[in-house]
Image (cartoon, grey):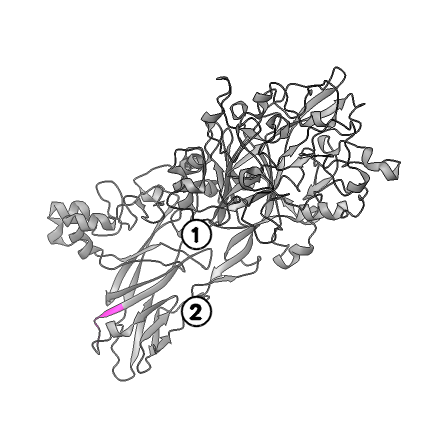
Amino acid sequence: MNKSQRIKIDVDATNVDKYLMAQLEQEVDTLEFLSMSIDTKDVYQDFNADYGVLVGRVTANGGVGIQNAKISIFIPLTDEDASDSQISSLYPYKSPSDKNNEGKRYNLLPRVAKTDPTTKVTSPKQPFGSFPIKEETVTNASFLNVYKKYYKYTALTNKAGDYMIFGVPIGVQTVHLSVDITDIGEFSMTPASMVTNLGYSANLFTDNNSKIKPSTDLSDLPNIETQEVAVDIIPFWGDTTNFTIGVTRQDFRIRSVIDNSFVIFGTAFTDGDNAMWGARGSNNVKEVRDLFRARPDANVTIGMASKRTGKVTEKIYYYPSSITDDKIATADPIKDMLILDSSEYSVYKRDGDFVFIISCNRNKVVTDEFGNKKSVDDSSPIGVYTEFRGFITLEISPDEVPMNFTGDMDDSSTIVPFRYKLKFPQYASRNHSFTWEDAKSLGTQTNPKADTEAWRKQHMKFTGGKIYSVAKFHGLTYNTESTDANQFFESSEVNEVFARKTTINRAKGLDSFWNVGIINNSDYQDEYENSIYGFPTNSKDYYNLNVFGANWMNLCVYLPQLGNCTAGFSRIRYVRAADNFHKIGDGKQGTDNDNWYKKINPYYVNNNDQAIAAGDVNTKFLARSDLNWTDIIEISKADILKMNGTTKKGFTNQDIIEGLQSTTYRNGVKVPTGWSAACPINGGKKEALPTNAADPLIYFYKGFGTSNCIEFIISLGLI
């Protein structure tokens, strides 16, 4: 059995011990300190050592271990090598402040970026140093000679921020630190967050604060820090009487403040100009089914070629750290949540594509002696936040992409377009969407107030250093029933809040012109080149057209345009919009309690005073949560690079030959923790046919037209 002996190191002490002395127990195989260890079989071969062991930790924020910091024992250039032009050109340093022919002082930062062969991720994003990478030292004899002689005592800190250099010459040595805070693992800073959250001058950055302005003088770079300190190295092993050992300790505290953040990115598109669901039917009479009809030219409404992009508008709601995790379950989002001010996070947008860089604000931690994260109180002056709890809403506003048209169902009706707005995440079981809380409960249906409270509470726990994207379920509602001009549910269907005879989440074999939310990917009459936009297909409709619907789309948000009937109600009675958007019967209670659901107030197509969260009101245009499910998915850098490797705009997981790492992508099979199903209302089935088996494919779309959210996030240097 391996026997170990631990050398206690107090990482919380203000005045740390320079030298760590310990009496060695007999038959010790391993010495442990901080998060590291030494195998005694390799090091205790003599009773006296003319070398020492240097250990320590690099921290920021008063006690957070910093990964990938570089430590070395500085070795001055010898007079002999100074006269050798080949050596001195590579290593001109007689002191750490000397500069090479590029104007860079002594440092341990890489001179070129390196790509991880497994993940394909390149780091650092912007190399500013002069240190040769391993590939150069093994292929260049001059680099190798310099490395073996002058960089022989170097180390990188591990995830805990700890380092160890074994075999250091005893006596006073100059110990050097180099660190790039954009290349320190999970706590790596982005240029954008350095400006937004740490207050660095924007003059130090370029490309809309996505890149650091280059300089050969390392002291001019906001992300680079170097330090030197003189340390007296004691012998590691030399007391033959008391069998004691000595370890020299030198910690570093970097001056830079670390702010931990995460990224949400994606893309969005909406329907075209003059396109919406809700138009005149074939018999020119007003019936509820007409609200499901694609506005002529119907090929335009359902076709991918007609879609539009615009810059999204977001709101970010969050729980402050004062609402601890154990209080979340009983918290009131209306009172306890806050809205993140736009000045508190970084935003990058272009038509369709968006990237949000958001700082964590809860669960503050430091690094303990063993290298583990240890939570500290929010009031503590030390530590870094690691989590964030909240949700977002996304829309493409009418100001950004106007809808300057109207429609009709006959000469006396007026249909005004509106566009969906969505909350991420949101989900609910059938007929339990959020609703107007003062509405009367229908039969045995759950209290509307409870359904809405559940909707408000749905949020995401984000972790610092991770990248997230969005996913949306493309719900479908199909209705061509014309026998009943009213089309409310019958008395036996009192708990149903879809229109009478609505077919939900089916694309296979149906007429797409009456199937709200479906997308056509087939070319038509040489006029509608839908296929060139590369949107995925999962079914074929009545006309054998390639279509998509009734399944999840990852990375991309489709925001449909529907029609709201604002005039000429006589034949359709009280319904105002297709049930894909809101529940039939959703509105203010009338005086006739038995038939109140027929006294429709078009609540969600008008401004209202219903609370969302954080004191924010007005649920206008927010789409029903029992059909329009949304989610936020975690996505690895490696997966993003793999997706970038395919030229397809729309693709499935089968198109990524190397396979995807993330397990949170949404499809017809994946059921996240806490969710009741993979998809709403029999969705997510093969060929979009509710009676079929679940579809295991995962669908992705990078963006419509010139949009490409994968290319966008890479261009910002975030991968």
Type of residue at label 2? Asp
Q: Is residue 443 above or below residue 511?
A: below
Q: In front of the other: label 1 or label 2?
A: 1
Q: Earlier in the sequence, mark 1 or mark 2?
A: 2
Front residue (pair 459, 202): 459
Q: Is residue 375 above or below residue 246?
A: above
Give the number of the disc on residue 186.
Answer: 1
Give the number of the disc on residue 10.
Answer: 2
- For the C terminus, give its image quadrant: top left
Type of residue at label 1? Glu
Residue 50 lies in the magenta-colored region: yes
How many numbered marks, from 0 up? 2
Residue 404, given in percent of the width and then of the height, sits at 64, 19
Residue 128, given in percent of the width and then of the height, sits at 31, 43
Front residue (pair 548, 246): 548
Mark 1 to mark 2 CA distance (whole Å): 24 Å
